[in-house]
Image (tube, grey):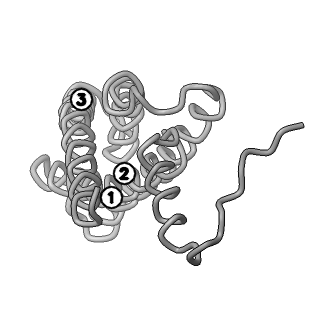
Amino acid sequence: MSERGALRARLDLLAREVAKFGAVGAFGLVVNIAVSNLIWRTTDIPVVRAGLMGTVVAILFNYVGFRYWTYRERDKSGRTRELTLFLLFSAVGALIETGVLYAATYGFGWNSPVQSNVFKILGIGIATLFRFWSYRTWVFKALPAKEAVLDTDRFLEQRRPAGEVAPGPVRH
């Protein structure tokens, strides 16, 4: 496969991953906003606390979507590690998201229902960029691809000086 073909294949895989991540995230957004608004409208719980509650429900929803759909082919060997990292990075994302809502509500006094929803969505957008990077990098790790191993072998063959023989497999 040419370098251009390999790059195109990698970009196609990334585009599919982003689309799946976005689809799960879109459903999570609906869950997050629905739960937050339900709490805002039916209880006396403060805006930021209710927003955080919506975030927690969405995080649980998203884990199921990411593990069993977006990243279903990724390494499943360390579920405890995976869930721990997912919750850790989700908590950082929740801090980002809630921080934006907190600043709007208590820093600027913008706490009408429309303003709360706008800043909730803005916080989710910023936190989503962090979550995408952290989940794909640290939580749902890719398994080594056979193509990557073959491409590396071909690359090494091209770089070997003429007449040099490739080392054989090590046997014990």
Query: Element type at marker 2?
Result: helix
Q: Which residue is mark 3?
A: 31
Q: Is residue 121 left or right of residue 135?
A: left
Give how far across and how far down residue 39 sits, in percent. 27, 29
Which of pointers 3 and 1 lies earlier in the amino acid sequence?
3
Q: Residue at x 52, y 42 (%)?
A: 144
Q: Is residue 1 left or right of residue 148?
A: left
Give how far across and how far down residue 57 sits, in percent. 37, 28
Q: CA distance from mark 1 to mark 2?
A: 5 Å
Query: Element type at marker 1?
Result: helix
Q: Which residue is mark 2?
A: 132
Tell me the kind of residue under disc 1: Leu
Farthest-out residue, bottom: 161
Tell me the kind of residue under disc 2: Phe
Q: Nearer the viewer, residue 128 or 5?
A: 5
Asked if disc 2 and disc 3 are in contact, CB closer than 8 Å, the reply is no
Query: Element type at marker 3?
Result: helix
Asked if disc 1 and disc 2 are in contact, CB closer than 8 Å, the reply is yes
